[in-house]
Image (spheres, rainbow, N blue to C red):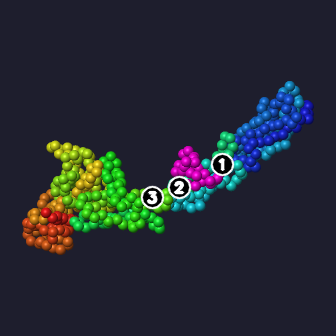
Amino acid sequence: MAADVSNEAVLTRQPSWPQVFSGERVTLTCEIVGGENTKWVYEWSGTKSYIHWTYNDYYFFSVLESNSRDYMCRGRRIEDLYSLTEWSKAISLSASHKPQALLNADVRDIPVGGSVTLSCSVNQSSGWEYFWYRDNKSSEPLSKEDAAFRSNGRISVSLGGLYWCRGGRGDPVYYTEYSEPVGIRKNETKAVLILSPSWLIPGTSVILNCKVQHPSVGWKFFWYKTVPKVSGNYSYELLPGSTSGTEQDSYIIHGQTHTAGYACRAGKGDPVYYTEYSEPKFVWSGDLHSALSLTVNPDTVQHFHNDFVLLSCGENSSERRLSRYSEDGFLEHCCRWGTKNGSTRNVHGIRYGTVVYWCESGSAFSNAVNITGQDDDDGIILVSPVHPVTEGDSVILGCKLRTENVLSDVLFYKNDRLIQSDARGELSIPAVSKTDEGLYKCQYSGKESPQSWMAVKCK
């Protein structure tokens, strides 16, 4: 029989949380009171084997829900096989299901220039530290550079996105389940520029209006001209009188003669918080000028869908880019240049609808042209000049099927008013005057072309 040893075995555990969870690591330590100067081996009850001996006074394992049981220990002197202490008092371990962190937000919309506070908690047990994640919960936890840590369970964020959190405790760290995600929206104030007119009218000023999505008092407005960057999009240069911003949300440009791009943004506060730049808007001129010009061949506004036209930005087209603006408001810089018969040009397929084309260099804009694509292969198109016609010059308007010109019985309209309805197949104007400027279309055999503007310029 085993000899009784008067030393008492005392079992403790770490961590000492009142509640442990499935998968959490627990370390049991067996202390033999008064036996510090004696070498012991230790027997453990409640472990995975019926008899479990160790030469260390500790035993660690990961608790599973199926491990729920009572644990005890006792000691035996190494030199005496029968010198056993009594069993220690039992420690009951019952593993609960891994908990899930709970994430709350005070608000879901980040105010302009501000932040929102997120709170993470684990309702079961204690001792948790909290780890935060944005956009992808498998990413690295957020650092102090990503968010302002208010306390162990609270952070302030100024970036929109999906956020998660989870709790962790112990060494090695035992993690809870991730919280459900919370979506945070950044209240992005973007400026919107409204420009009028879109096409330059001689003697008429260009008016810019800048609007913010969430207007309030205190905004100042900053006005810019756009400068093309062939390798990128645009840079912005402040317009005169706009360095410190204006209290008025409008800006007038006098004497504009060529195609130009503009943008705006708003700012408030000290230091100034700026909105994003507005999308660039353009005022277009149809006049050709020597510095940078866009030419079109065939020289007509309307084409059938998928027809090809030759677009050229002059002798140095390879150093310039072709830009286009569709009627749905989509701005695109496009098209590689090729060389044919010594001339640099772009062979471009026509898309449906009306598109404005122009050329851009590193510092300038060319004239602009309207190109309209007819999507009905059985329809007709108006043959009219793509560039403004000079007063006194002659012009001939025609009507064309996809396969041939219409030579007779064509009706011509100006500003929706019938102006020619005889057997002729073309409309001839021997000497154009300013009164001939307007919207033209043609009809033939029940088919009607789209309308196109014919511009007239002074000599």
- In-image side of 31 versus 260 (left or right): right
Horizontal and vertical percent for residue 99? 66, 51
Q: In the rendered structure, which disc, 1 or 2, sits on the residue that comes first in sequence?
A: 1
Horizontal and vertical percent for residue 238? 36, 57
Above or below, 95 against 383 in this view is: above
Residue 158: image tag = 2
Give the total of numbered labels: 3
Q: Which residue is mark 1?
A: 129
Question: Spatial distance from mark 2 to mark 3, Cα to Cα?
Answer: 15 Å
Residue 274: image tag = 3
In depth, the one of 155 and 166 nearer the eye is 155
Horizontal and vertical percent for residue 83? 88, 30
Check disc 1: other Cα within 10 Å, few if <14, some if 14-19, many if 20+: some
Above or below, 348 against 441 in this view is: above
Which amino acid type is shown beneath numbered disc 3? Tyr
**In front: mark 2 or mark 3?**
3
Q: Quadrant of residue 382?
A: bottom left
What segment is highlighted magenta in the picture?
Answer: 132-158
Q: Which residue is pictured at 36% across the width and 63% down the height?
A: 193
User: Which quadrant of the figure contains the C terminus?
Assistant: bottom left
Which amino acid type is shown beneath numbered disc 1? Glu
- In-image side of 88 versus 100 (left or right): right
Instruction: Judge whether residue 99 is colored magenta.
Output: no
**In front: mark 1 or mark 3?**
3
Q: Which residue is pictured at 90% across the width and 33% down the height?
A: 5
